[in-house]
Image (cartoon, grey):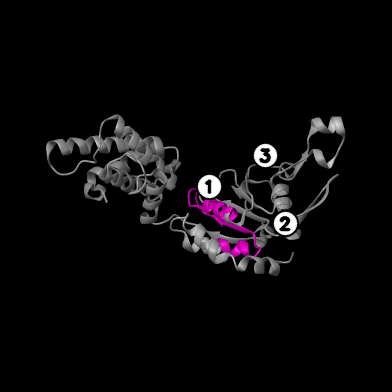
Amino acid sequence: MDDQTTVTRNAGHLTRVRGSVGRRVVGRERELDLVLAAVAAGRDILLEGPPGTSKSTILRAIAEEWGIPFVLVEGNADLTPSKLLGGHDPARVLREGYRDENFVDGPLVRAMREGGFLYMEEFNRAPDDTLNTLLTAMAERQVTIPRIGTITAQPTFRIIGSMNPYDHVGTTRLSTSVHDRFNRLVVGYQGAEAERRIVALRTGLGPDGGQDVPTDLASALVTDAVALTRATREREDTRQGSSVRGAIDLALVAAQLLALHGVDSPGEGRVTAQVNTRRRYAEAVLESALVALSGRINVDEAAGTTPERVLREIWEDHFILHPAAADPG
């Protein structure tokens, strides 16, 4: 099926799919529109951005709306062409010989046969020969496998890659021929308000979230978790800060820790009991941040510091140096 037929078939569904997916993705209207337009037009696309920026969420939602598989594969040095394509089951080959029935599809062949999205994370970590196999599938929409023959992709088959621009360890520079085959979309971090909405939704700490946490405490946890997480991206001594996933975990861990300590309020005002509650709340947030964020930030080696020290400094700035910024809401 040619590209124009693919576009025509999907054009009447774009508005419905856009509306349905948009209700599941927070603050990604532009990115959703562009990804949806690209895949509906029959194009493969490379998404470039840090982890935790809703790339796979958007793609999973589109695939689900289209009723097609979402096939996830991680790019790394061990991803050979044979792993991508698949192979015959050795035990069955010994008993039956080489037969179509004992061929086990790899992720690329499965996505082609079933017309799904092949989503390769860490695309620039895959070896060159593996990427060349992908280029053949992209250019011809088919691959030829010894003893099996030619596999032709279904019309909805797409190859979608993702790359982290901040991570250069173990990665390779993509060739011009690879870039020439892909559309490219840069996906950055969302704004603070969008991230607060995401954390409230994912943790159940929003107004209708169902968590058994007082409203003022839930609001404070969401606000503080997002503020501390976003601050990890703004430091000169970090090469990469945490994604919103860190804020989600921070809020969830802190909520449980506060429940263990019997704290049901973030504490406000100057009354002694409230100040003590505020101190206990802030300390719980710090301990939770060390657990949730320390493994997610990449400290610049030249800075001579540690993730724990960076997080403590961020916490002090938020709760002690500028306490007004830490007030709920």
Q: Amino acid at mark 1?
A: Asp
Q: Which residue is mark 2?
A: 154
Q: Residue at x 71, y 47 (%)?
A: 110
10 Å neighbourhood of mark 3: few (<14), some, or many (≥20)? few
Residue 123: x %, y % from top left: 62, 49
Q: Amino acid at mark 2?
A: Gln
Residue closest to the eye, 114 or 192: 114
Q: Residue at x 68, y 65 (%)?
A: 6
Q: Residue furthest left?
A: 271
Q: Earlier in the sequence, mark 1 or mark 2?
A: 2
Asked if residue 41 is among those painted magenta in the image, a careful observer would answer yes
Above or below 110: residue 258: above
Q: Which residues are magenta?
A: 35-64
- Marks 1 and 2 sit apart, C-alpha to C-alpha, by 34 Å
Q: Which residue is mark 3?
A: 78
Residue 148 visible in this rendered orientation of the protein:
yes
